[in-house]
Image (tube, rainbow, N blue to C red):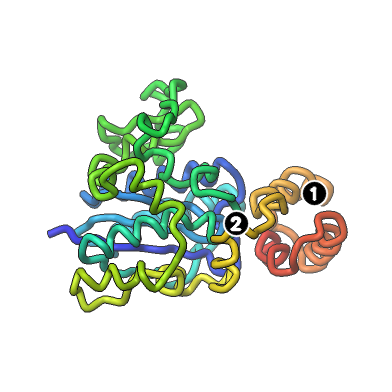
Amino acid sequence: MKKSYHLCFSAGEEVLFRDVEDYNRGFNCFAMALFNTDSTGLVESEMSTHYHQLIQSANPEDFMHRFRLSYSMYFNRKYHRSGKLGEKNHFTMEVVGYNHILAAMSYVLRNPLHHGVAPIPYAYPYSSVNAIFMKEMGKVPCNGLLDRKYYHRFINRASQIPDNYVMSESGVFLRESVLDIPQVENLFVSPRSFNGHMTRKSSEEWELEQGRDNNNLPPINLSVIEKGISITPTGEMLVNENGRSNYRRPSDIDVCTEIDNNILPMYSKDSVYQLSRQEKQQIAEYLYRTLHISECQIKRCLVM
């Protein structure tokens, strides 16, 4: 019997998705793990250092194992890296009850806002937020679709692909073809209600609403859903939620692009994982002087 789970896979001290290709492959691996474990995807949000997923599955551990294995193989091959990717244990929490699942979906989709990488959830391209109530909210469906004979360029060649999965020309499955969007829309009830949840502030009232489910589980809040994610303190996430973040500062993908595309060729290296400690220190000092970013961000983008 399928149950609902919030899962989160963290890269620890590394960046999980360094460029757009990584984000696309990450979602493709997520989509194939759903299919291969007969699981149902509801909502998800890919952050640079972690990946929030809300799924319905009879075996969430098998799902996460398949996702991690397929994405790690891709990542290690691309970046000349070896070993397991990410922290040893991922976060798993069963979600029970209408208010509980509604809060979980909302926090997952609002994650970019909380981490200060987007001023509103809809501005973030690497989550399923824009696949919900697409027509009603004026979103234009993707017209540039890839011929199915080319799908295996962007997933494991041995994979069996479900007929309902549709891929864009950029090599990523369309979220509306993978996720159970009708169920998500039924849970949010209406576009107006959905938009209200995307702009709602974290509060004790929201936590009390979840108590109506009588599930003997802790209410979903930032401390619960971000457990084990140290990139942004809870207090800072609440500030970001109120729209007080500097959204123009370089993101991890901006910093990684600068490193991978512009700096690595100067060192005749193909990957940040091939740099020596001394070379990383030189690059770190350059990034600090030119981009004025934090030491923590430099360290994770350089894998120091």
Task: Return the residue at label 1.
Answer: 263
Type of the residue with mark 1: Ile
**How much space separates mark 2 and mark 1, taking CA atoms?**
33 Å
Q: Camera-side residue: 7 or 111?
A: 111
Which of the 4 quarters of the picture holds residue 116?
bottom right
| Residue 245 shows up from this direction | yes
Is 30 on the left or on the right of 116, as rendered? Answer: left
Type of the residue with mark 2: Gly
Crowdedness near tag 2: few (<14), some (14–19) or many (≥20) residues, C-alpha within 10 Å? some
Which residue is at a point 50% across and 49% down the rendered structure image?
121
- In this rendering, the answer to whether 241 lies above or below 223 is above
Percent of width and height locating residue 229:
51, 70
Element on which disc 1 rests: helix
Task: Return the residue at label 2.
Answer: 243
Which residue is at a point 32% across and 39% down the rendered structure image?
178
- In this rendering, the answer to whether 192 lies above or below 51 is above
Percent of width and height locating residue 87:
48, 70
Percent of width and height locating residue 226:
46, 69
Q: Which mark is residue 25?
A: none
